[in-house]
Image (spheres, rainbow, N blue to C red):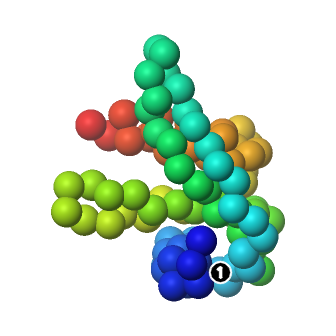
Amino acid sequence: MPPKEITELKDAIRATHGCESLHVESVPVKEVFEGQAAWEGKVEVFDLVGHRQAKRAYAWSYRDGNQNKVVAVLEIPPVDSPESAVKAALASKARSN
């Protein structure tokens, strides 16, 4: 992922969760629901610096209409991987709709 996008995700983590982060890796994720791709893209993995509960976060951006949106999910059970972070975010979005 280009450095600009990594910086945007780090800014989102700082704004949402109040801590600094270090980029670790990019992980391709495809979440399938009832045989259809519910989400597909790269999830960026970050180590967190100074967060009280979590040591890691998973973040990605996506297009919603004409807006770029960012999701940043902490690695707190049941979230323990990029895949489970995407599942948790999709479930949360479905509950809020």
Q: Is residue 48 above or below residue 58?
A: below
**Residue tagged 1:** 19
Question: As drawn, which residue projects farthest toward the front?
Answer: 2
Q: Secondary structure at mark 1?
A: loop
- Count of residue discs: 1
Question: As drawn, which residue projects farthest toward the top?
Answer: 34
Kind of residue sitting beneath label 1: Cys
Q: Quadrant of residue 96?
A: top left
Can you give x and y, in whole percent of width and height, for residue 82 in the image? 68, 48
Q: Residue at x 20, y 55 (%)?
A: 65
40 sits left or right of 80 in the view: left
Can you give x and y, in whole percent of width and height, for residue 92 in the image? 44, 40
71 or 77, which is in the foreground?
71
Q: Residue at x 61, y 56 (%)?
A: 43
Q: Is residue 43 above or below residue 36?
A: below
Location of the N terminus by quadrant is bottom right
39 sits left or right of 78 in the view: left
43 sits left or right of 90 in the view: right
Can you give x and y, in whole percent of width and height, for residue 23 in the image? 72, 75
Q: Is residue 52 above or below residue 90?
A: below
Q: Quadrant of residue 49?
A: bottom right
Can you give x and y, in whole percent of width and height, for residue 2 in the image? 57, 78
Q: Is residue 27 visible?
A: yes
Q: Is residue 11 visible?
A: no
Location of the C terminus by quadrant is top left
Q: Residues within 10 Å of mark 1 (few under 14, many from 20)?
A: some
Q: Residue at x 78, y 70 (%)?
A: 24
